[in-house]
């Protein structure tokens, strides 16, 4: 079946722990995250660690089928239930009996089907199309989606009662760009796998400067995209060129844009906030609120300075660009002691 859950980030570590705790419960679970982050991997791991392993693991993609077809796939139908139903057909709830049913892309399910699904979850019973008789099903339902279901609820696209039924356990997988420390373990895992698939003893790891650039990339396709990049590197060899193309085709500027802080950045933050100053911590002179204000002030100051610099200190122009009122900008300039570089008191 699927791979183990690879990763060392806080997010993945917590998910691994959660999987260990949840797997034996069979509580309805929703797995949330962008495309390619590993939702199916988590579902497979839940199944593999559960007492249901050995029973069926059935998956259905709710986004791939039109409503009618999805309904007949989920619940099955009797012979003659509709034109073309020449034979009785067993639905996924029947096929998954005793095991796990992964409802992938549940956010794309129609409201009508959501109501029918809710009924199954409440009663543990469902009726195939064209049948009067309800069948019992003992199925662990795991749902996955890249939608923001809370938002879908406010937009009237997702039933709140279904959400609370499904959402006993919620697992959110962060996008890969927010956990760059997982990139190296993933590379090592997949290179080893490709080596054994290709029958070669081992495959060379990309050089460290290439890995450093991969950690800066924003990975819109997440782990699936990383796999594709690795395969391309294997076949084409020229790692640097492949990374160049990544940044070019997605229009991401090299470095800088990544929200992920390198160890060096974190060191800078620590020293900026004076966190290594023991006395500060021991005397309770440190507070998160004050630290946050200090950090926000610094960032605001830099942004305002940057814009003023680019507008030749035309403050009304700068205010327009920053989308604040002229007065707010003047207040900020005073409050944050913003001056043109040549007037900076630090340098005199
Ligand atoms: N933490 C991980 N450890 C190992 N492999 C992973 C991990 N996360 C993702 N992968 C791999 O990345 C690929 C994409 O993962 P998966 O299909 O689970 O993503 P998904 O969130 O279901 O994506 P989609 O929304 O597109 O269906 C798979 O080949 C999977 O094995
Ligand atoms: Mg998936």
Image: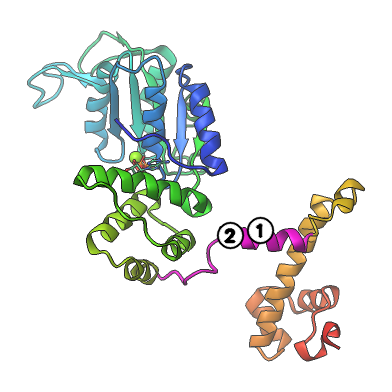
Query: Which residue is located at x 45 percent, y 51 percent?
Result: 183
| Quadrant of res 338 | bottom right
Highlighted magenta segment, given as a residue range: 251-273
Q: Point out which mark residue 266 bears.
A: 1
For the N terminus, give its image quadrant: top left
Hey, which residue is sitting farthest right in the picture? 283
Residue 102, x across and y down, in percent: 35, 29
Residue 208, x across and y down, in percent: 44, 61
Residue 59, x across and y down, in percent: 29, 29
Asked if residue 266 is among those painted magenta in the image, a careful observer would answer: yes
For the C terminus, give its image quadrant: bottom right
164 and 190: which is toward the camera:
190
Residue behind mark 2: 262
Q: Colour scheme used in the picture?
A: rainbow
Apparent side of residue 89 relative to residue 320 in the rendered image (left or right): left
| Quadrant of res 307 | bottom right
Asked if residue 209 is among those painted magenta in the image, a careful observer would answer: no
In this rendering, the answer to whether 186 lies above or below 88 is: below
Could you tell me how far apart the alpha carbons at marks 1 and 2 are, in whole angstroms?
A: 6 Å
Query: Which residue is located at x 53 percent, y 67 percent?
Result: 257
Query: Which residue is located at x 39 percent, y 14 percent?
Result: 51
Within 10 Å of the Cα at label 1, are there few (<14), some (14-19), or many (20+) other Cα atoms?
A: few
Residue 131 visible to an observer of this rendering: yes
- Helix, strand or loop under label 1: helix
347 and 80: which is toward the camera:
347
Residue 114 visible to an observer of this rendering: no
Apparent side of residue 138 relative to residue 253 in the rendered image (left or right): left
The response on whether ligand 1 sits within 8 Å of label 1 is: no
Contact? badges 1 and 2 (CB < 8 Å): yes
């Amino acid at each position: 079946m699927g791979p183990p859950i690879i990763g060392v980030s806080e997010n993945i570590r917590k998910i691994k722990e959660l999987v260990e705790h949840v797997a034996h419960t069979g509580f309805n679970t929703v797995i949330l995250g962008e495309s390619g982050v590993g939702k199916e991997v988590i579902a497979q791991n839940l199944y593999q660690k559960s007492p249901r392993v050995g029973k069926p693991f059935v998956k259905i993609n709710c986004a791939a089928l039109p409503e009618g077809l999805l309904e007949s796939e989920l619940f099955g139908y009797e012979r003659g239930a509709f034109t073309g139903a020449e034979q009785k057909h067993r639905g996924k709830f029947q096929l998954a009996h005793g095991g796990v049913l992964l409802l992938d892309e549940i956010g794309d399910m129609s409201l009508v089907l959501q109501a029918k699904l809710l009924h199954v979850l409440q009663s543990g019973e469902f009726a195939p199309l064209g049948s009067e008789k309800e069948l019992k099903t003992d199925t662990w339902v795991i749902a996955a989606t890249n939608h923001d279901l809370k938002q879908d609820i406010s937009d009237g696209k997702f039933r709140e009662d279904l959400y609370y039924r499904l959402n006993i356990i919620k697992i959110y997988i962060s996008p890969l760009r927010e956990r760059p420390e997982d990139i190296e373990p993933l590379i090592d895992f997949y290179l080893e796998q490709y080596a054994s698939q290709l029958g070669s003893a081992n495959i060379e790891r990309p050089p460290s400067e290439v890995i450093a650039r991969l950690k800066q990339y924003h990975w819109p396709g997440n782990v699936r995209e990383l796999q594709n990049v690795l395969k391309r590197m294997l076949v084409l060899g020229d790692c640097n060129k492949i990374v160049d193309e990544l940044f070019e085709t997605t229009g991401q500027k090299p470095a800088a844009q990544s929200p992920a802080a390198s160890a060096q950045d974190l060191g800078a933050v620590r020293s900026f906030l004076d966190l290594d100053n023991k006395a500060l911590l021991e005397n309770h002179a440190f507070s998160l609120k004050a630290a946050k204000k200090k950090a926000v002030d610094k960032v605001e100051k830099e942004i305002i300075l940057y814009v003023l610099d680019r507008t030749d200190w035309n403050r009304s122009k700068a205010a327009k660009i920053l989308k604040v009122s002229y007065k707010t900008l003047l207040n900020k300039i005073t409050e944050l002691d913003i001056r043109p570089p040549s007037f900076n008191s630090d340098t005199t």
